[in-house]
Image: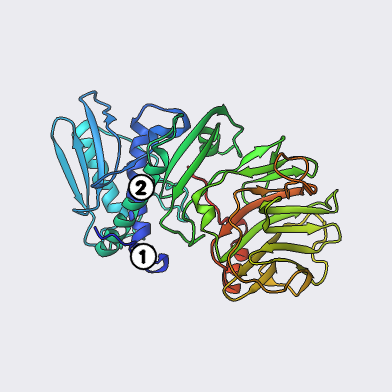
Amino acid sequence: MSHGWPALPYESWQPTRDTLHSHTQVLGKLAAALARPEPQLQHTALRLTARGWETQPLPTPDRSGALVVTVDLHTYETVVEHSDGRTRRIALTPDRAVGVVTREVLAAVGDLVGPVTINPTPQETTWSTPLDEDTDHATFDTAQVDAYFEAATQAALVLAEVRAPYRGRSTPVNAWWGAFDLSVGLFSGRPAQPTSNDFIMRNSGDAEQVAVGWWPGDASANDIQLGSNGIPMNGVSFASGLVRQAFSLDGMDDFVDVPDTPALHAITTAVTVDAWVNPQRPPDGEGWIFARRDPLVSEGISLAINGDGFLTTALQADSVSDLASADPVIQFNGEWKHLAVTADTTTGHVRLYLDGQPLAMQVVSGPPNLGGRFADVTHLFIGQRQGSDTPEGQGGSLHYKGLIDEVEVYNRALSAAEIQAIFKVGRRGKCKPSF
């Protein structure tokens, strides 16, 4: 293994990625069918080992011992192993269709421990063909698989390092076959209200936790690297959003507090913030959608709407720039709107977008262009500015009223074409749950 991070652009490896993802789904389906249920669906999680993606030892239906199934990324096989030493190997190459492999894996399992029935419908994917009938996914480029495995192994080691000092309940570094991601969960010990009533969130989101994860890329977002789950404060509720559930904020005192993580400190010279919003007129005259700031130290980075319908942003690098759309653009009419701000201090450019289109802008105060580096602050909020009603600051919290969905932060300035692509994704969704 090299010490550098392997290059593996999503566009170049998508066919192999989707095939590999499908093979891991078979393992997850077997775990779901055979393992005893655990809180937060932990019994369905796989592991990334030195061999590849692997189930935990699963109880066999014939009570003859334990079964482990591995997608071996060295030999490019799915390996079915019984605790008594019996083994079956199913080749993944050359370019064997997922449907063929799935049927052979299930036959091998049946040969070792008796028939096992799984639900063959893939989960959390853009395709729906049953795994045992799938002839669309067959590409298996071994060089790309090697590069993925190298990157995934490095990511897993980082996640293990994040987990190591935590003294509360935590998960291992799980390999989740639905989203094809790696993640670790750190639990507070307090219950939580699931953010939606679908099966996965209802069963995995019922405990307060911070989930930190890594994705190898998919068609809805090329940039997801590390994340931190926000904590709803002062009675934040949830309502039907553009994609599943959205934060519903009352404009009085509720907001979402996002804990400080190393990922947020990667925002140094460039940033993009985007979100879908369905706003009501802010009771304080201005409603802040997003704020990364320390009010006694810096303005940081923000995105807000004022009561007259102007979209505004405040950014601090070597100076503070307050900018706004040249005209009112928000109607407060119950419609969903996609908003974005991009900034790059190396070029000095700041851009505001509405529904994928750049807006004409005006300078409220400060210079129109930026330079230097963004202030390295630790507070990130969704739905408030942070002010006098919080311990750290003063000046009014300017709470947002309405719905907020699909908030994203990038440590680079997305291009106009990328903002347009995110807008076009719309209700199909661009953010993924951790489980």
Q: Which residue is mark 2?
A: 156
Q: Position of residue 317 (x, y in %)?
A: 63, 65
Q: Is residue 285 left or right of residue 197?
A: right
Question: Which quarter of the image is occupied by the N terminus?
Answer: bottom left
| Circles 2, 1 touching at the beta carbon (< 8 Å) | no
Residue at image x 68%, y 63%?
A: 315
Give the amino acid type for the residue marked by disc 1 in the picture.
Answer: Leu
The outermost residue toward the left is 85
Residue at image x 23%, y 38%?
A: 109
| Element at label 2 | helix
Name the disc covering residue 301, or none: none
Q: Along the line of sight, which residue is nearer the eye, 108 or 407?
A: 407
Residue at image x 62%, y 51%?
A: 243
Give the amino acid type for the residue marked by disc 2 in the picture.
Answer: Ala
Q: Is residue 113 left or right of residue 117?
A: left
N-terminal-most mark, 2 or 1: 1
Q: Position of residue 144 (x, y in %)?
A: 30, 63
Residue at image x 24%, y 33%?
A: 67
Above or below 141: residue 184:
above
